[in-house]
Amino acid sequence: MLLALKVELRPTPEQATWLLKCIGARRCTYDVLLEHFRQDGVKWSKKAACGLFMREVRQPWIAEVASRAPRNAIDGLDAAIAVRCSVHGGRFDEFWGRRAG
């Protein structure tokens, strides 16, 4: 039997701003790292992703949010790549395009 729980958030304006910054930091980190690791000859590793984030992705506005938001983006990308490679036999040539197979 599946049970579901629905939760409604009603943040204050300050909390809403902070939540949006966290979401933006995670999305920005995910997109930049995905773009970098899709290049030919670039191998995926979490260590390299963390180093790239510290060198190139990190922006002053990202420092205003929890440090866990970008780290969750790296973990999420690692999980996505693992699933993609296991399903498609290790191919990383096409990664979640609208028309990609």
Image (cartoon, grey):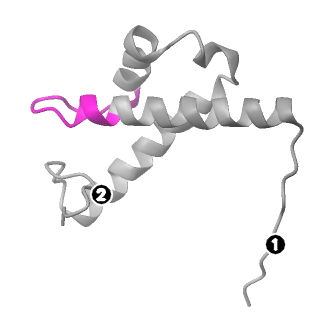
Q: Is residue 77 above or below residue 60?
A: below
- Mark 2 surroundings: few (<14), some (14-19) or many (≥20) residues within 10 A: some
Q: Nearer the viewer, residue 75 or 18?
A: 18
Pointer 2: what residue? 84
Q: Is residue 61 above or below residue 33?
A: above
Q: Nearer the viewer, residue 84 or 7?
A: 7
Q: Nearer the viewer, mark 2 or mark 1?
A: 1
Q: Nearer the viewer, residue 30 or 19?
A: 19
Q: Magenta stretch: residue 56 in it? A: no
Task: Please name the residue shown 67% across and 36% down the image.
Answer: 20
**Can residue 25 be seen here?**
yes
At label 1, which amino acid type do we have? Leu
Task: Please name the residue shown 74% across and 30% down the image.
Answer: 18
**Can residue 71 be seen here?**
no
The answer to which of marks 2 and 1 sits earlier in the sequence is: 1
Q: Is residue 81 above or below residue 64?
A: below
Separation of marks 2 and 1 at Cα, in angstroms: 29 Å
- Residue 28 picture location, percent across and down: 46, 31
Q: Is residue 46 above or below residue 91?
A: above
Q: Image quadrant of residue 90?
A: bottom left
Residue furthest left in the image: 40
Pointer 1: what residue? 5
Q: Which residues are magenta?
A: 34-46
- Residue 52 picture location, percent across and down: 37, 17
- Residue 85 picture location, percent across and down: 26, 55
Which of the numbered marks, if any, corresponds to residue 72? none
